Each structure stands twice: as C-alpha cells, then as structure tokens.
Amino acid sequence: MQWESCRSRTSGHKPTFTRAANAHEKRYHGGTGRGQAVPHRDQRQAPETAAPRAAGPLSVSDAARAVVCQPLLETLRLGSAAWDRLLERSPAASPFASWAWHWAWAHSAPPDDLNASYAVLLHGAGGVLEALLPVAVRRVTFRRREVTALTWAIGELGCPDHLDVLALPEADLAAVVPALKALSWDVVFLSNLAAEAPNALQLGAALTRHGCAVRREALWTSPYVELPSSWEEYLASLSPTRRQGIRRAERVLKRDHSVVVTDYSTERLEEGWRHLVALHEQRWAGAGTFSDPRVEQLHRCFTEEVARRQQLWLTTLDVDGEPAAAWYGFADRDTVYFYQSGRDPRRAHQSVGVVLMASMIRRAIERGYRRFDFLRGDEAYKTRWTTSQRCTFELVAFRPGWGGQWLRGLDAVGRLGDRLLPRNPSERVRSEPARA
C-alpha cells in the first residue's frame, strides 16, 4: 500500500450533516457504526449510530460565555492550534485526546459514525476556547437493552487510553451541561479516563447537580515506569535475575552479531511502518492489531502527524543488516507511550524484543523523560519491566426522569450480578487484539 498523506485526503472526505430548518437546531441521522464497540464487563456493543428523539440547540450563550455544538469534522478542519493549546493545559490527558488522534480517526471511521460525531465548545471572555468535548450519539447495547448513549466520538477504535475532557483550569464545565442535555441520550459513557482526570470529574459533578445519577468504575490496569535519572538506577530497581537477564541478552546479541537501532521519521516513515506491520504480523501469525484495515489506516494517519511534530518513536532493531524487532510509540510532554511492537519469531531465542525495549527505556531516561507508559493491559511482558500500575476508569451518567431511573435500576442489578459472578477484566469484549 502506498503511503498517502491524510492531509491530501481532506478535500475528498466530506461527510454531510443535515441541519434543521431552524438555524439554531441540528438533527442527527442514524446509521451503522461498525467497529465502535465499548469493551466492558456488561458487554455493551455499538451496532449503529443513534437517531435522537429531538433536535438539540446548536448554541447556548450568556453574557460571559458561549457554548457551541457543531459537527466534529468542522472543528477538526479549523486546525490543531486551539485544540492542542487545551491539551497542553489538561495534564491528565494523553495524545489520544489530541487533534492528531481525532483527525486520524476521522479518516478511518465509517461515514455514519462520523456523521453522528460533534464537538461541544465552550468559549469564554473574548472568544477564548476554554473547553472542548468531542462526542457522539450512538445506539448501544447496555445490560442487554438497546439504549441511546453519548460517548467519546473516537469510541474504542485503536484502544485510546488516559482520556480527559480538554479544558483550561479556570473553565466552568457546568456551562456545557445544558448543551449536552439538549442532545438526545439515555446514558453517558465516558470511558478510558485517566486515573486522575480532574476535568471529567468536574463534568460529572456538574451533571449530578443537573439531576443526573453519576457513577464511576475502574476499567484497565496500565503499567508504567517512573523514570530515574540514569539507566543503572533503573536496572537497580529490578530483581537481580531480571537485571542480569537484560544485561546478558544485550551482551550476547552484540557479541555475536552486528546490532543497529534504526529510527524512522518523516523521510522514512513508510519504510519503518512496513517493517513494524510485517514483524508484528509475524509475531502474531497474521492475527495482530493491524490486521484490521481501519486500525492501520488510523495509525498511518496518526503517525504522519506525530512524525511531523517530532514526537514519533518508530524504531527497528537490525541484526546483521535485517530488522529483527520493531517498536512503535510516541512522546508527549514528560511521557513516552509504548503502543505496539513486533519481532521475528526466528530470533525469539535471542531476546531481540527485550533488547529493543531496554534500548527504548534507556533512551527515554537519557532524553530526560519522567514516565514510560505501557498503556492498558497487565500482560506479563509489561510487568517484568515495572511493578507500578494505575487504572483507567469510566464515568457513567443516567439522564433524569423515569427512563434514566429504569436504566439505573437495571444497572444496579447487573452490577450486583458482576460482584456475585466476577469476571476477569481480560475477558471484556475488545474491538481488536490486545497490544503486545
């Protein structure tokens, strides 16, 4: 597949949005939202986008602020500057909340999903953008009942982690609640929130004050390393057996072979991506993450943007001139995020994956980063590198009224069943294979 710029496709990707005759209203049109399942122990699924019961207001304003709800693609086409300024002021939010990730998602999502996605914008004094919520109205299955839900626009495609509402510290998120309630939904699901997502919690408190029943629930374990000042200090934090194993793997591989770490930036992006996908597919015998064309399309677009910003970490470990392992992640502020990897199964006995991961952690330390994040999943290969973990969570809000009360009761019964018959989190429905 030829590498095609996401930016070059913009003019050809023009979903249509139908507005009501009244300029202050908009209407949503339903359809099929394939691939947007929300993995959770209650086995919610998103088979289609929603057709809300009534039109909601396009804008809400008072003397101090204005709230606007507009098609997400319209907001994305305004560019990244204002969006990413909010990201910089929202320290809990990861790059999955960025303009770049949403832009990439918009180029990989089914048209019906994109048509059901909106941006709720809070403007303060002087028109300054103070908060942004990219959301979608979808039909989902919740506790074996079909309901209309308000979710993150990006859904679960690509397994985004550590999300938060993007907002300035001084933003009054209660101001966006009337606009959110004007959309037609039965329940709100804001999933994959960062462990310390303060803006989402502020929004949840505001929804409570407006009569919604709100709860939160733990979701995914995410291992991470708080990086010390030196590689030797990090090695000293590991068990003697693990420490000796890493050193031995590096020493033996470099003694017996020519070993080179190769980085791929904008000029060699297609080449690096080809190596990553090939080695990942070899590792998982063709059943890896990128076997889903939508996931690969999303990441091709995303890597193009983060490479342009010099935040992409796309690397191979070359042994005797041939790529033997590949590593894909990205850096943002003080954190390096590990997303995906691959290796040649024929070189598994040489621990090429271990050697490359060690090289990436060492590089993060040497470049002054403070955290190395393995993202969701407590797979054994991650916990060999660290014992530190945090947990993402989900915020759920039920609309006031008898319908919301009924769903809340249904949820309470289901949660009781979950406690009596607990499931392992790894058994939750996923939209794609686990990252490994």
Image: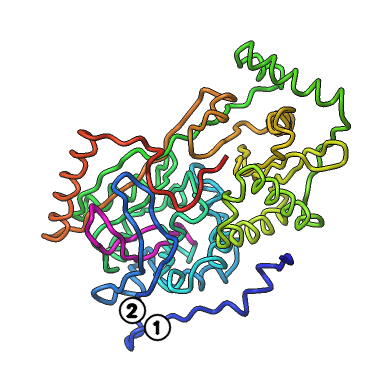
Q: What residue did someone put label 1 on? A: 18
Residue plotted at (80% across, 55% down): 268
* Residue 147 included in the magenta stretch of the image: yes
* Residue placed under numbered mark 2 in the picture: 27
The answer to whether 257 appears left or right of 310 in the picture is right
The magenta region covers 129-151
Cα–Cα span, label 2 and label 1: 6 Å
- Where, quadrant-wise, is the C terminus in this rendering? top right
- Residue 404 position, x and y percent, is 17, 57
Residue at image location 70% in from the left, 50% down from the top: 278
Marks 2 & 1, CB-CB < 8 Å contact: yes
Q: Quadrant of residue 9?
A: bottom right
Residue 307 coordinates in the image, percent (x, y): 71, 54
Residue at the extreme bottom: 21
At horizontal 16% and vertical 50% (from top left) the residue drawn is 410
Q: Amino acid at mark 2?
A: Arg
The answer to whether residue 362 is seen in the rendering is: no
Mark 1, secondary structure of its residue: loop
Question: Which picture quadrant has residue 403?
Answer: bottom left
Classify residue 37 by image quadrant: bottom left
**Which of 78 and 169 lies nearest the eye of the viewer?**
78
**Dominant secondary structure, magenta:** strand
At which x and y percent is residue 23?
Answer: 36, 84
Q: Earlier in the sequence, mark 2 or mark 1?
A: 1
- Mark sitting on residue 279: none
Going by the numbered disc 1, the residue's amino acid type is Thr
Task: Give the quarter of the figure containing the N terminus.
Answer: bottom right
Left or right, 360 with reference to 85? right
Q: Residues within 10 Å of mark 2 (few under 14, many from 20)?
A: many
